[in-house]
Amino acid sequence: MELRKEPILISEVLAEEDCEILVDGDLIVPDIKPDILKVLQVDATAYLSRKELGDGRVLLSGRVDMTVLYIPDCEGTAVQHIHTSFDFSHKLEKRAIVTDACVFAEADVVRAEFHVINSRKIGLKAIVGLSCEVVGAKQLDLVCGVEGAYAEQKKEALMLNTALSNRSETFLMKETLEVPAGKPAVAEVLKVDLKIGDKEIKPITEKVVAKGVLKACVLYMSMADSIEFMEFDVPFTEVFDLPGVYEGVNCTLDYQISDCNYEITGDTGGERRIVILEVTACAKLRASKQTEIEVIEDCYCPGYDTQLQFCEDEVDEIVASPSCQNTLREVVAIDKALPQIAGVYNVITKTVVSTTRIEGGKLEIEGKIDAYILYLTDHEQMPVYSYKKEIPFRYLLDAPESEDGLVCAVRAEVEHTSYHLNVANEVELRCILSLSADIIRKRKLSLLCEAEILPISCEDKKGIVIYFVQPGDSVWSIAKRYRVPMTEIIDNNQLCEPEKLLPGTRLVIPACRKVS
């Protein structure tokens, strides 16, 4: 008897880790910059620039760019800024990691702190949150048929999330931007904030078309020493090779910015009104499909001693994938004791999921959006200010196939943020929150892997047997025990509903014989 096997690839998480690392150092004020009187703001951005994959380990490397805005200790000088960078690295070690796996990683600054040591020296500290997932492809050889001999087969249908491709692709966006009409020319750039939104992904044969919009906010000093800002939306389209993908499969896309460089140059009239922006980004692509496959759970050959071997395995079975998109509105009033708003420069949002719970066919997701409102003021000693507002959320997503105790992989992201400064000097926020989840059941499988048929010894051969059904018996278990075809038991005993076999039922079991 030969087993006909069908290979199926499924994604397997080889290692994952979420951790926080400390990145710190001292910043010495350059000689060309004046002394520090008061620090207005310390802005920190983490860039993950390198992922080294080896057997049993992943090394992540990157840097934290920090921008210090301060009031100088001299009259007649505008707000000053200093840029500095600190490198960091982190190693994830686990024996299961292999070199042909795919690494999905991202870095984000959780918190930035500073203390002024003296007028020429600042101590800086950033807590960087690192998230790393190493994904490989595992092959399951599923037995779907038997050849070479007649066999009774017990089958079951498996629904598996089969892996088509996992890939992390780096790409460069270079754009020449012009200072908007009505805005003054640039003397110095103070800081640049970037975010990628409006994501779209379309799978085609062996490729995916990925789209998005790079949203850039630039805070700068004008030639007249006034603080100004400008915003740009840069749409982009990238085509990535993704073997095994075709139209209609399930694809997910996430972006992570890994580097940013800019240069200010003159326009045709010689004014510094041209911004050359270079941004390196990483596209994290996953493609899969739901595959239903019928496998042999058990089998035997009538008239033979059938020896079976089983392999134990575990797979992630996606029970449900609920999603929703909601708009959250919040009116933010700035406390009278704080510097009041002259103009909103930017709103940066971060999403935190605090609780997930499955109950009664519903997935409950609770969390908050941390909205950082960066604004300009009319206050001489505090011309720029950052105000944090927490916006809580709670949603129930339909997941009728789910049950208590299952694993929830939740993704929460603010797709778009808009704001408006009303006449009452309040900021009206509008955040489009996208929520999606995979509800996963860890399913243990006992997979048939080997089979052998042997002749039955003379002492084990049985003639006609009278058998009384015991609790837990089925036609299958009885037929396999006596090595006879199921149909012969059903026909000989005129069983109209063989699936409803009652304990105590008297059955005539035919003699064991080979079936060709």
Image: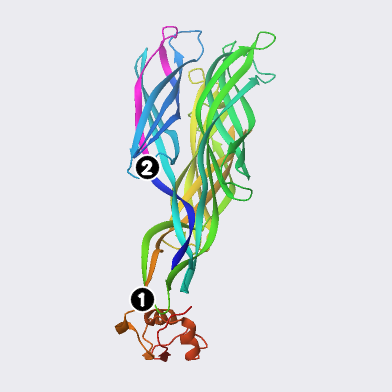
Secondary element at image label 2: loop
Work out whether 164 lies above or below 27.
Answer: below
Disc 2 residue type (three-letter):
Ile
Nearer to us in this view, 315 or 511 = 511
For residue 361, the mark is none
**Three-letter amino acid code of the residue under disc 1:** Pro
Residue 301 lies left or right of residue 395; in this view the side is: left
Q: Farthest residue in the left direction? A: 459
Frontmost residue, 2 versus 237:
2
Task: Please state which of the two labelled residues, at mark 2 or mark 1, is closer to the viewer.
Answer: 1
What residue do we see at 43% from left, 40% from top?
100
Looking at the image, is 396 positioned above or below residue 46?
below
- Circle nearer the N terminus (2, 1): 2
Q: Is residue 198 found inside the magenta-colored segment of the image? A: no
Q: Which residue is tagged 1?
A: 455
Q: Position of residue 295 (x, y in %)?
A: 48, 65
Task: Give the main secondary structure, helix, strand or loop, of the magenta stretch.
Answer: strand
SS of the residue under disc 1? loop
Across and down, in percent, residue 248 comes to: 63, 50
Q: Which mark is residue 97?
A: 2
Residue at position x 45%, y 36% in the image: 106
Q: Is residue 233 left or right of residue 470?
A: right
Magenta residues span 16-38
